[in-house]
Image (cartoon, helix red, strand yellow):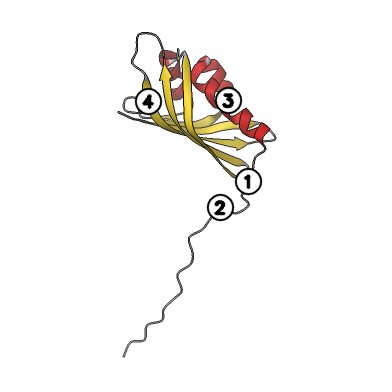
Amino acid sequence: MTAFTRTARKPARVARGSSTLSPREQGVLWDMEEHFWTSGAESARATTAPNAVTVFPYPPGILHGDQIWSHLRQRTGWRSVVMAERRVTPCRDIAILTYRASAEKPDVPIYRALCASTYLNDDDRWLRISHQQTAVA
C-alpha cells in the first residue's frame, strides 16, 4: 500500500515590506509619468533607467534600452494626456503606477490605453524601469 502525505499548500506570496508613499512622493511619480507622455524623448530618457523595458501595442512591441528612444523620437508630440483610474502600488523601493490614459495630439484620433509603469527608488531618485500600454478600442 502506498502512503500519501498531504502537504499544506503554502499561501500565495504577498509583497513583504509594503509601504505607503506620501502624497508628495505620489505627486512626483505622477508628474514624471505625465512628462513621459508630453515632454519629449529626452525628458523621458532622463527619468528612465538605461536597461528599461517598454511594451507598446504592435508595432513596435517590446523595446529594450536604446530601442525605446529611437521609437519615442518618432512618436513624441502628445499635446496632453489624461490619466484616470490612477493607482499607486508601493513595495519597498518600487512603485507601480496603473491608469487609463487618453492622449491627444494634432491630426490624430485620441489614443486610449490601459497603462502600467514601474519605478525604482535608486538612492532617492525615482527611475522608470518598465512601461506598458494596452490600446483600448
CA separation in Å, label 1 and label 3: 19 Å
Which residue: 39% across, 29% down? 113
Q: Which residue is mark 3?
A: 32
Mark closer to the chain start, 3 or 4: 3
At mark 1, the secondary structure is loop
Q: Position of residue 40 (x, y in %)?
A: 51, 15
Q: Residue 55: x and y, percent?
A: 40, 31
**Disc 4 marks which residue?**
112
**On-image quarter of the N terminus:** bottom left
137 sits to left or right of 45? left
Asked which secondary structure carries label 3, the reply is helix
Distance from disc 4 to disc 1, alpha carbons, whole Å, reads 30 Å
Q: Position of residue 2 (x, y in %)?
A: 33, 87
Instruction: Check disc 1: other Cα within 10 Å, few if <14, some if 14-19, many if 20+.
Output: some
Question: What residue is rendered at 31% in x and 28% in y?
Answer: 58
Residue 92 circle label: 1
Residue at the farthest bottom position: 1
Along the line of sight, the residue nearer the viewer: 13 or 102:
102
